[in-house]
Image: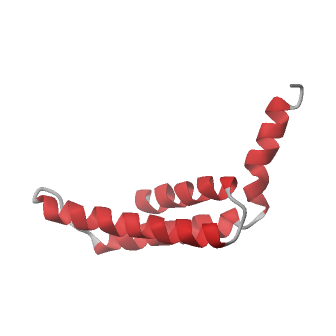
Amino acid sequence: MAHFLIYAGIMLWFGFMYEPGKKYLILGLSLILLGVTLEILQGASGYRSMEVSDACFNALGVFAGWLLARTGLSSTLLWTERLIFRDQ
């Protein structure tokens, strides 16, 4: 569950910053590659194990964050900035 939530949060956070489009796809694929790479490195370390399920939950989290970032929720950061800085 932690893997899913962390990767969903990261994808959603960057989804707040970028307009939907090709950048979302590149970001999502990069985060999935990061999750897989980290799992492989954990397995190669000798004292941690590689878990395929962790990599799958990472990818599912990225997908969930990508879906949420494509909703109206993506304008939350802009709304917050306008609220904070409206008097300046």
Which quadrant would the N terminus be assigned to in this image?
bottom left
Q: Residue at x 39, y 64 (%)?
A: 34
Q: Residue furthest top?
A: 88
Q: Along the horizontal axis of the image, is 14 left or right of 74?
A: left
* Closer to us: 51 or 34: 34
* Closer to us: 83 or 22: 22
* Closer to us: 68 or 88: 88
User: Relative to 80, is 44 above or below?
Assistant: below
Q: Along the horizontal axis of the image, is 23 left or right of 20?
A: left
Q: Could you tell me if residue 41 is visible in this image?
A: yes
Q: Position of residue 68 (x, y in %)?
A: 67, 65
Q: Position of residue 54 (x, y in %)?
A: 35, 67
Instruction: Kindly indicate the quadrant of the structure image that contains residue 48.
Output: bottom left
Q: Could you tell me if residue 54 is visible in this image?
A: no
Q: Along the horizontal axis of the image, is 60 left or right of 88?
A: left
Q: Residue at x 73, y 46 (%)?
A: 77
- Total marks shown come to 0
Q: Residue at x 46, y 67 (%)?
A: 30
Q: Residue at x 46, y 71 (%)?
A: 59
Q: Where is residue 13 in the image (x, y as percent from the top left)?
A: 61, 52
Q: Where is residue 7 in the image (x, y as percent from the top left)?
A: 48, 60
Q: Residue furthest right?
A: 87
User: Relative to 55, is 78 above or below?
Assistant: above
User: Relative to 9, is 84 above or below?
Assistant: above
Q: Residue furthest left?
A: 46
Which quadrant would the C terminus be assigned to in this image?
top right
**How was the colour assigned to the protein in this rendering?**
secondary structure
Q: Along the horizontal axis of the image, is 14 left or right of 5?
A: right
Instruction: Kindly indicate the quadrant of the structure image that contains residue 32.
Output: bottom left
Instruction: Kindly indicate the quadrant of the structure image that contains residue 67.
Output: bottom right
